Image (cartoon, rainbow, N blue to C red):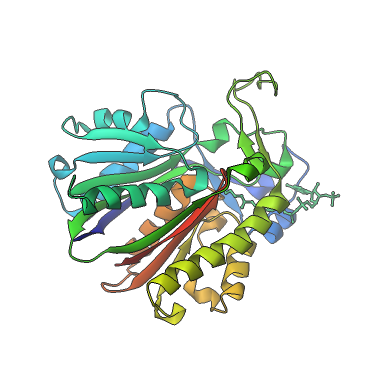
Amino acid sequence: MTARIIGTGSALPNRVITNDDLAKIVDTSDEWISSRTGIRSRHISDAEETAAVLAARAGQKAIENSGIQKDEVEMILVATCSAEDYFPNLGCQVQNMLGMEHTVGMDLNAACSGFLFSLNTAFAYIKAGIYKTILVIGTETLSKIVNWKDRSTCVLFGDGAGACVIRAEETGVLDFVQHSDGSMGHVLTAKASSTETPVQPETGADPIYMDGQAVFKFAVKKVPECIEEILERNHLDKEEVSCFILHQANKRIIQSVAKRLKLSEEKFPVNLEGHGNTSAASIPLLLDDLNREGRLHKGDKLILSGFGAGLTWGATLLEW
Ligand code: UT7
């Protein structure tokens, strides 16, 4: 018995901010942002579009897409690192918004690897026979903690949510690998109120700090490594994998991973042009795009791979 993704959904804030819009508030240009990252625009939430609201919208769509009744869901597991509240957790907020009082709700924070780690956690619960049906959501409103005066980070991120329903079935998730390196945690941080960094008066939050080049180097090394690790231990040739769904941080990272694995870039779909880096939401947003465009076929072997703050990284092999 394993666990299969049976439905996907996503939600994006209404407001779209282009690179040209950003060039009006920081010293940047469409040329710099698009050539260095591949990003052209991103969705930015307003006060009402909280991480929980986006999560609930994406979750609702995933339930509809799966064809199950919401009463069949036993757990809501939400990946996020930018929720507006320390508590109640977003799983409980989504439970309340969608009227799913019989479920258990909780959150998981592994930054941009959060959705992948949550999917793996849901798979483990199902494989252990504890639950049969779990709603897994990745949701972020990083725009609310980003420093809008720091051009090196504010141009990168976008808001949104993606979700999937995963259910006990004979085929589906086949294996996963997960890794962390806390000794490198300092290269990508968002500190809660502390005495070390001044709290931003506008938002009450501390700005995100990122050593972009260190994160870039980490990603282009560790992502191919963990993909090779999962292929090897499942005796699978990389050519047998139809599609590699990577965390959407930077188009150059994705191209570099394809090159290192000696694979065609066509196997690495990209949707970051219109989303920016949506952290834990990026993989389920892309999964939902591909699913709704009919680009995933029953029996396809897919590898999902996430990487981010922590540092954290990993890969999940599944059959669609
Ligand atoms: O999801 C979490 C994981 N995060 C990531 O994967 C991000 C990984 N890192 C990256 O994607 C890239 O490192 C960045 C896109 C963040 C930066 O690209 P880069 O090619 O590494 O640029 P850089 O940081 O080396 O900066 C090059 C220059 C600098 O100017 P000088 O020192 O050469 O004069 C920066 O000040 O570009 C400047 N710069 C900008 N210029 C225009 C930095 N940000 C901007 C900007 N617009 N927005």
Residue 236 appears at what percent x and percent y? Answer: 39, 77
Q: Is residue 223 left or right of residue 131?
A: right
Q: Quadrant of residue 199?
A: top right
Q: Of all residues shown, which one is farthest toward the right?
A: 27
> Image quadrant for the C terminus?
bottom left
Which residue is at 72% across, 44% downward? 152
Which residue is at 40% across, 23% downward? 87
Q: Is residue 235 left or right of residue 5?
A: right
Tell how many labels.
0
> Image quadrant for the N terminus?
bottom left
Which residue is at 66% across, 45% downward? 155
* 109 or 40, nearer to the observer: 109
* 295 or 173, nearer to the observer: 173
Decide if residue 57 is in sight here: yes
Residue 180 appears at what percent x and percent y? Answer: 53, 48
Residue 195 sits above or below residue 12 on the image: above
Q: Is residue 40 left or right of residue 122?
A: right
Residue 178 sits above or below residue 189 on the image: below
Residue 89 appears at what percent x and percent y? Answer: 36, 28
Residue 173 appears at what percent x and percent y? Answer: 30, 62
Decide if residue 275 is in sight here: no
Residue 62 sits above or below residue 235 on the image: above
